[in-house]
Image (spheres, rainbow, N blue to C red):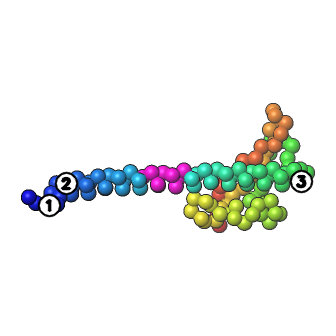
């Protein structure tokens, strides 16, 4: 009687390990992507909230008509409303550039804040 595994048994184990590795790798990649997207959305919320705080203090600079005021995020950081870590893109660690568009919604009688990403110079 021979002791050990046959070639077929070894191949089945290797194939099963390969399938398991692919499933785990795919799951890890998806979790990482979802985490970066969530962090990016949170960062946009932080930038828009910083613009809201800036707008509260600098209300005299904001329009009361349908024009759009563009507030650079570097200005928010320089004025102390954002931390320098908020100026990095969480997806790839590169510099984050953009403006917060502030406009007055006449129907709701309030300001709206919308962050728009731009290419860095």
Viewer-nearest of labels 2 and 3? Answer: 2
Label 1 Cα crowd, 10 Å radius (few <14 / some 14-19 / many 20+): few
What residue sits right under mark 3 in the picture? 57
Most frequent secondary structure within the magenta stretch: helix
The residue indicated by pointer 2 is: 9
Q: Label 2: few (<14), some or many (≥20) within 10 Å?
A: few
Judged from the image, the secondary structure of the residue bearing numbered disc 3 is helix
Q: Nearer the viewer, mark 1 or mark 2?
A: 1
State whether residue 101 appears in this view. Answer: no
| SS label for mark 1 | loop
| Residue closest to the eye, 29 or 76 | 29
Compared to 87, does 29 lie above or below? Answer: above
Marks 1 and 2, the one that precedes in the sequence:
1
Q: CA–CA distance between discs 2 and 3?
A: 72 Å
How far apart marks 1 and 3 lie (CA) works out to 81 Å
- Outermost residue to the top: 107
Q: Provide the residue designation for mark 1.
A: 3
* Residue segment shown in magenta: 26-34
Secondary structure under badge 2?
helix
The residue drawn where x is 83% and y is 39% is 110
């Amino acid at each position: 009687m021979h002791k050990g595994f046959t070639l077929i048994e070894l191949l089945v184990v290797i194939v099963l390990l390969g399938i398991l590795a692919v499933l785990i790798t795919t799951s890890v990649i998806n979790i990482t992507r979802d985490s970066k997207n969530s962090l990016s959305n949170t960062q946009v919320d932080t930038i828009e909230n910083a613009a809201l705080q800036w707008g509260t203090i600098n209300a005299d600079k904001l329009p009361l008509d349908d024009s759009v005021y563009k507030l650079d995020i570097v200005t928010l950081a320089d004025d102390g409303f954002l931390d320098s870590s908020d100026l990095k893109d969480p997806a790839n660690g590169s510099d984050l550039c953009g403006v917060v568009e502030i406009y007055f919604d006449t129907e709701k009688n309030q300001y709206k804040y919308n962050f728009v990403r731009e290419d860095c110079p």
